[in-house]
Amino acid sequence: MKKSLVLAMAMALGVTASAYAANPFSDVPAGHWAYDAVNKLAAEGVVDGYPDGTYGGDKLMTRYEMAQIVAKAMAKGANVDKLAAEFADELDSLGVRVANLEKKADNVKVTGEIRYSYRDIDGDVNSNESVLRSRLWVNGQINEDWSYTGMFENEQDFGDNDSEEDDLYFQRAYVEGRVGGLDVVAGRYNEVPFSGNILDANLDMAKVSYGDKVKVSALAGKAYDTADNVFDGNGNEYTLQDDDRIYIGSIEAALGDVDAYAAYFKTDSSLEKEIWNVGASYGFGDFTLSAEYMRGDKEHYANAGKDGWWADLAWKGAEADQPGSYGIHAGYYDQSVNAYIMPTTDAWYFDDGYKGWNVGVSYTFAKNIVGMVNYWDMESQTTNEDAQTIFSELYFMF
């Protein structure tokens, strides 16, 4: 380093005297013309010498090495405009490299969720289960328009000694992005359209959507990891099976405080159903009122009807990032088996359809720790059987 550069850098940092008694470098003894300046630069973290404890003042340095020193001095607030101008290209290159490293470090994010749940069922059906479910999410940014999501899952059933508790399943693997004006989701995905009263299923699928406040979507896929070979008492398949194909077309609109939607569902392979639905939710103050009507075109159960409907009133809601937040809700179901495919519910429901009511509460105990309790009182659509379900769960998110 030239004598003028050392002095200029040191003066920019305010060196006026030998205020630093400790000598960090064996080859810059007291009395050396650069002693004060080098000592100051070392104390400020601008220069750090070599691993053998020498400064190496007689060695040549590259422009990139000098640019690193200038960058450190700038970070300390030194006025080194002339040096910054001289090494502008090297600084720019250094800055781009650091920015890219930071971007890559943020490019992949890993998050997780642990849920402990307990379910107790009474009535004409009696059972209980206690399950610990762990999920690990991996999210990566492919480019400005595309991202990747993967999810691993493990479940431990404390009441089933034969459960495969050591198995870790790769439950999600999909990409999201844009092609032209279309939003695209493709891969292994959990599809829950709208309320979930018709479908909540794992699909190998592709979905395209167009629009913002009014959105039109089309989906094609096939089921995986479902309840394979599930039959009712008459030998009919009443829910989605592995490899069953499904097609969905929908339109949704955000109309001020009202969100409305309509959709058409079609399945083939082992389960053949065609169902359409309309629904809406209305927010007013801390309340949200939701309702949905659904109708199937085929009567798999002749005495179960083709129609179904659902309504729910919710007040507030527990937010994971807001300790002390809470919510309550109450709803009613009248679900014909002919008007759903695989509904989302933690209640016991009968294979010929179900009807009944539900209440639930949620509360955030601490940041990212949320508890929920729900109660359902359901009865069969075609018999006098009934079942009461209490389902409690505690989430830990990280």
Image (cartoon, rainbow, N blue to C red):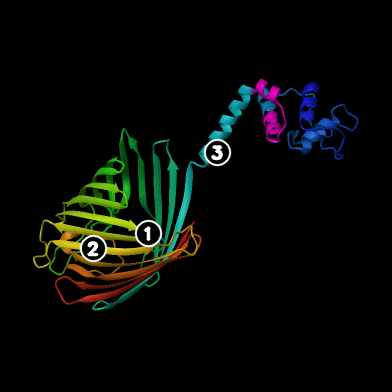
Q: Residue at x 74, y 22 (%)?
A: 60
Vertical relation: 255 (above or below) 198: above
Amino acid found under the numbered disc labelled 3: Glu
Do the residues under discs 2 and 1 have CB atoms within 8 angstroms? no
Q: Could you say which disc has been placed on residue 102 in the image?
A: 3
Q: Quadrant of residue 318?
A: bottom left
Q: Earlier in the sequence, mark 2 or mark 1?
A: 1
Q: Which residues are magenta?
A: 68-87
Asked if residue 84 lies in the magenta stretch, the reply is: yes
Q: Nearer the viewer, mark 2 or mark 1?
A: 1
Q: Residue at x 56, y 34 (%)?
A: 99
> Of helix, strand and loop, which one carries label 1?
loop
Q: Nearer the viewer, mark 2 or mark 3?
A: 2
- Neighbour tally class for label 3: few under 14, some 14-19, many 20 plus, Cα within 10 Å: few
Amino acid found under the numbered disc labelled 2: Trp
Q: Earlier in the sequence, mark 2 or mark 3?
A: 3
Amino acid found under the numbered disc labelled 1: Gly
Q: Residue at x 31, y 66 (%)?
A: 346
Q: CA distance from mark 2 to mark 3?
A: 48 Å
Q: Quadrant of the N terminus?
A: top right
Image x and y of residue 373, in percent? 38, 70
Q: Is residue 284 left or right of residue 326?
A: left
Residue at the spot of label 1: 285
Residue at the spot of label 2: 310
Q: CA distance from mark 2 to mark 1?
A: 22 Å
Image x and y of residue 219, in percent? 24, 45
Q: Is residue 112 left or right of residue 280?
A: right
Q: Residue at x 68, y 35 (%)?
A: 75
> Of helix, strand and loop, which one carries label 2?
strand
Q: Is residue 356 left or right of residue 139?
A: left
Image x and y of residue 323, in percent? 50, 62
Asked if residue 262 lies in the magenta stretch, the reply is: no
